[in-house]
Image (cartoon, coloured by chain):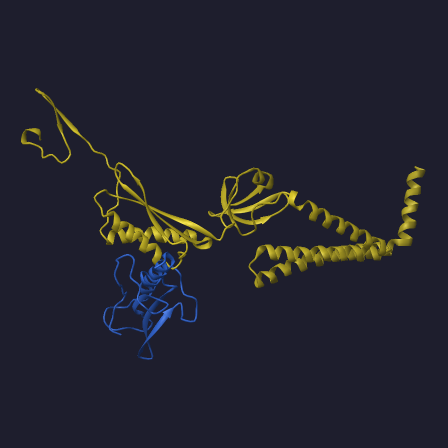
Amino acid sequence: MKLAQGLKVIEKGWIVKPKGFRVRYQKRVDSEMVIEYSPRLEDAALDSDVTTWRYAWKLFQATQGEPGEIVEDELVNITVVDELNNPIIYYVTGEEEIFNLKDG
Amino acid sequence: MNDQLTKLQNLGVLMRDHGLQMILALTVLIVGLFLTKWVVKKLKILLGKVTKNAATISIVSNSVGVIMLAVVIIAAAMEMGAKIGPLIALLMIICLVLIGIIVIFRPLIPTLPFKVGNTVKAAGLLGKIEATTLLNTRMRTFDGKTFFVPNRQILDDIVINYQYTKTRRIKVDVSIRYDQDLAKAKRVLEALMTRDARILAKPAPQVYVLKLTPSSVDIGGRCWVNNAKYWVTKCDLLEKTKFAFDNEGIQFAYPQLDVHHYERQESGCHVLHNGDEPQDDEV
């Protein structure tokens, strides 16, 4: 295998670089739980996972309700995903993270 | 006395013969100047909505301003009864000569090594260029201060233009303790840079062992990023490196100093080495 081929193999198989990040969350709309994204899927994604996680945490802080039932305008199961909707590891803990985890 | 009287009479004759024309010409000139200023101002606002390029806005609006000014002057001259044929011919000649001089001597004309909007370090200041004139450059530093720097000072100084090239290299240097897993630390740092969406794939991120200091092993990550994203990406990488090393159990090095405690005894000196268990009589 040529060196260039080897580098291509590494590029494809080692670490897949995400192209963008979005906050994914659920909210109650007309007594139905719906999944939404911010920025929306039709808008450009954010390019920093640090910024996106910070944004997710602020959304959580701004909308969290009491433990138990999900109230109107409350965002639950807030996490960060890539452009393929795969969850992104929270860089602070090194694990998957969901803010305001509730049964949706 | 007679001279002054003659002058006044001549002025009276002039006003009688051409007074109306002069007033009209002056009116055209004043209204024209105000109109030009208003049009340039509105044009700048309009162009600001179309493009963010400050240089383009400035060039287009100033060009329109100059053309309008020429038209106003010609119109005023016409009101005065001047023949505009020779005037236009003179203006054309002046324009052609100026263009010729600029084209021929352009390589010799000193130019500022940046454009409006560039981030530069010049004359001991780091900031964004807001505007340039023939005499000075307006620079806004990142703490919000506006500096008017003489161009002479900039031309005499070393200038770093951070946007001359499209990409920049980020350095992430960290120090780890000697008893830590060096290979693991290199892997973690390289993966961190590779995984970041903003880091360019080529040239690929690299991690080097930079130095073996008395109290640490210094490793350095090197990766490339687009200029506009340099600062935030660097800060993010530093933050992520701290957390990633913590999560992987890799300990950073701190400045370390070995202290040897000498205890004078009657029989002479005894040295207590690091790691030695102190004997009862030494404590």
How many marks overall? 0
B269 lies left or right of B257: left
Pick the front one: B186 or B21: B186
Question: Residue extending furthest front?
Answer: A1
B112 lies left or right of B187: right
| Chain A colour as displayed | blue
Which quadrant of the rendered structure holds the N terminus of chain B? top right
Q: Position of residue B88 (x, y in %)?
A: 81, 55
Q: Position of residue A91 (x, y in %)?
A: 29, 58
- Is B165 drawn above or below residue A8 in the view shown? above
Residue A76 in view, yes or no: yes
A7 lies left or right of B249: right
Question: Residue extending furthest left?
Answer: B280
Which quadrant of the rendered structure holds the C terminus of chain B? top left
- Is B73 drawn above or below residue A38 in the view shown? above
Q: Which chain is yellow?
A: B
Q: Position of residue B92 (x, y in %)?
A: 78, 53
Pick the front one: A35 or B202: B202
Residue A49 in view, yes or no: no
Quadrant in the rendering for residue A62: bottom left
The residue at the point 26 percent across, 49 percent down is B183
Pick the front one: B239 or A30: B239
Q: Position of residue B157 (x, y in %)?
A: 54, 38
- Is B120 drawn above or below residue A14 in the view shown? above
